[in-house]
Image (cartoon, grey):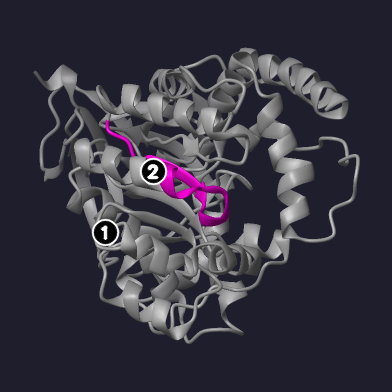
Amino acid sequence: MSQNYLYLKNATYIEPFTLEVRQGNILVQPGADGKIQFVQQIPDDAQVLDVQGKIVTRSFVIAHHHIYSALAVGMPAPKKQPTNFYEILKYVWWTLDKSLTKDMVLASALTTAIYAAKAGATFIIDHHASPNFIRGSLSTIAQALDSAGLSHLLCYEITDRDGHDKALQGLEETQEYLKHNQGLVGLHASFTVEEETMKKAADLAEKYNSAVHIHVAEDRFDQDFTLYKWQKRVIERLDYYGFVKNPKTILAHAIHLNDNERMILKFGKAWIAQNPESNLNNNVGFFSYQGLDRSRVMLGTDGMHSDMIQSTKAAYFAGLPVEPQDMAEIYARLRNSHRYLQQNGFKGDGQNNLVVLDYQNRTPVTQQNFLGHFFFGLSSRDVLHVISQGRLIVKDRKMLTIDEQAALQFAREQAQLLWKKMQEL
């Protein structure tokens, strides 16, 4: 029996919520809901990882990702230089997602899995779009992440921006996926979703005891267009369909809100996924939790990268000028993703998801000063080993589950094909 368990010998463990420091040997149970336990003795026939002098803590969750953007790094400039957020979508991201094939989505998922795992993340909440490869897109991503050993909560970005037929295909793909997998009902943003589609998405979420994952007021355009066409602001429209009252709902961004919308969210149950670097990159504004229940704010990357240590630091520094916060507040947002998954019964993010950090600290690490080390010392370069559901998937900074070099070579080939297609659209 001991051969099925992983033991971390001589561990220095940082409790993810209280930051309590505890030392000893850790038994890591396998499985989707596995636990950890401090033990005195380690069986002779056990699988043992000696982590003397290393820091062990809970691995990370990416609360809002776009795996489909993985092949965008280094791509050529768009044919037309965008001058506003809508044009960024039109000439960059909507051109990219329309060009994606099954192989490109597979390459994106495999490489994202590598970079996420090697940065200490073991769970990805993703928001996917590939309008010319809809059917089977979610299972393609799921299989890639499964092969790497990462857990996930996926959705397809349903939208009417490419016509109602594509919206129906997105609904069908979502339904087929939800029949056999945990997942969410993805919506692009209010300004691209017609009433009929919104109603069908609400019905689908109710049928499968799920919720929506949607971009919300990322730019003022979303608010202006929604108010013009449907005589409601974005949060008011989503509240009308019951999304704000659903504790599984994820609202990505939620930047441009008025006081009434903040009040609706405060007394609702939906969660917000903050994406600071993406907001800075798109110049859409800064997020502020003022007037909201900040215990329901999580951190994502919005496809910029897969490094949650970097994203957490960015949230802290970007937020200093616009909201009252401190390191403890922002670190709590990093860890709120665990609470979101646990409270809503999603599998794959148990205590047995761990990261081992080879952090060469130049000053002592204690419960009182760990946050100082996290924000001003640690980086993803310190990730040495990663354990997902009790299984070692990264050892000595190398993936154990998939062939990294083969996956990266495949991605480079698919990236060239993608970039060529984008130039032809």
- In the rendered image, which quarter is residue 220 located in? bottom right
Question: Magenta residues?
Answer: 182-197
81 horizontally vs 231: left or right: right
| Residue sitting at x 27%, y 58% | 242
Q: Amino acid at mark 2?
A: Val
Tell me where residue 18 appears, x and y as whole percent. Answer: 25, 67
Which of the labelled discs sits on residue 187, or is there none? none
1 or 2: tag closer to the N-terminus: 1
Q: Amino acid at mark 1?
A: Glu
Tell me where residue 13 appears, x and y as whole percent. Answer: 29, 53
Circle 1 Cα neighbour tier, 10 Å, few/some/many (<14 / 14–19 / ≥20): some
Q: Are marks 1 and 2 in contact (CB under 8 Å)?
A: no
| Residue sitting at x 39%, y 25% | 172
Q: Is residue 366 above or below residue 334?
A: below
* Residue that label 1 marks: 15
Which of the labelled discs sits on residue 355, or is there none? 2
Kind of element beneath mark 2: strand
